[in-house]
Amino acid sequence: MIRFLLKRFLNGLLILWGVLTLLFFIFHALPSDPARMLMGQRSDKASEDAIRKELGLDRPLMVQYAMYLNDVSPLAFLQENSEKPFYQHEDYGGIINLIPFSSSSALVLKAPYLRRSYQSNLPVINVLKQAFPNTAILAVVAMFFAFIVGVFLGAVSARFKGSWLDRSLMTISVLGMSVPSFFAAVLIAWVFAFLLKDYTGLNMFGSFYEVDDLGRGEYIAWKNLILPAFTLAVRPLAVFISLSRNSFLDVLASDYIRTAKAKGLKTGHIYLRHALKNALNPVLTAASAWFASLLAGAVFVEYVFDWKGIGYLVVKSLETFDLPVLMGCLLLIALIFVVINIILDLSYRWLDPRVKLN
């Protein structure tokens, strides 16, 4: 187990390094000027040159790359009392000195530093902390609904194979998988928050937190979660119905299921105690990939419903060329995929003891 975790951890680090490297060189090839963005309308050449020097933009590209790796890495080199510190430690809450090289330099352990936003000048990590909880709540609710309902409907479809109910569920599944996210978001918002607003009472736009009109501070607007969560759940729900149906049919054709039926066990008992656990493997695989995608940020859904999450932040940072925020969002997405894949591999062992972790 420890060897497996160590191997997956090292593989994850290599993936994150590859993503970081690719993003760095792509974004630094874009025609943007961070100094002008930070200065705004009151920019002048002297101030812009000072900002470029402070950000290290006056240095060769490979030096900038090394500086960014040093900032992002938890294990970094700190150099103080120089004209341009290689590592800006004032943006961290705490530093643990590991190997001091001199009075002004050391190898330290620190929190990753994703630079500062070109638009707000806030640390990117703070911007992500504000957006990520909204996306996490939206993704968890959407995935929970899609998984529970999808597995249930898939089992029902397998139980009544060939019936009108089976054909209807398969038609719904195909339609759900074929509908693009942005079209589903616009359609659902228009129908339930515009045409049927008098009956549903739902808003077309809204955040998870809203300000009370009577001045009593913020409150959680649960109704604003319904439409984006349902929209986000449409495609994974459709996939889970089809996967669950096929998986249940395969399991129900197994010898041990025939033995259970021959013993006179009830159908419900066979489904819950014998078929369900073994039928969940392919569904769990799909669920992990979908959950990683949802948690990383459903760009179109969050943008259409004005839901202030990671996906919404990606769109806004693209519109304003706020590259540090955009790179922070994409690195967070890559980290989420790596972590969830490791958790998925561990869950296989629990679902099927025959699976070995290599």
Image (tube, grey):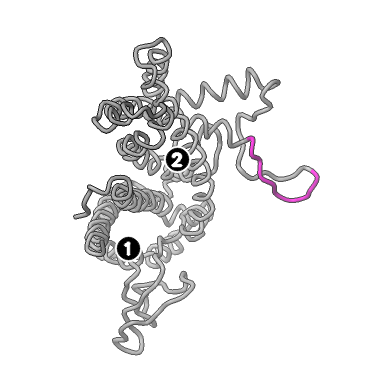
The one nearer the camera, 170 or 121, is 170
Judged by its main secondary structure, the magenta piece is loop
Q: Classify residue 206 as left or right of residue 154.
A: right
Amino acid type, callout 2: Val
Disc on res. 315 = 2
Cα distance between the residues tagged 1 and 2: 23 Å
Q: Position of residue 143 (x, y in %)?
A: 46, 38
The one nearer the camera, 212 or 46, is 212
Q: Which residues are magenta?
A: 214-223
Q: Mark 1 or mark 2: name the one nearer the start of the chain.
A: 1
Q: Position of residue 289 (x, y in %)?
A: 34, 40
Q: How packed is label 2: few (under 14 Cα within 10 Å), some, or many (20 or more)?
A: some
Residue indicated by mark 1 = 68
Residue 281 among magenta residues: no
Q: Position of residue 340 (x, y in %)?
A: 35, 49
Q: Classify residue 113 as left or right of residue 353.
A: right
Q: State the quadrant of the C terminus.
A: bottom left
Residue at x-position 36% and y-position 72%: 87
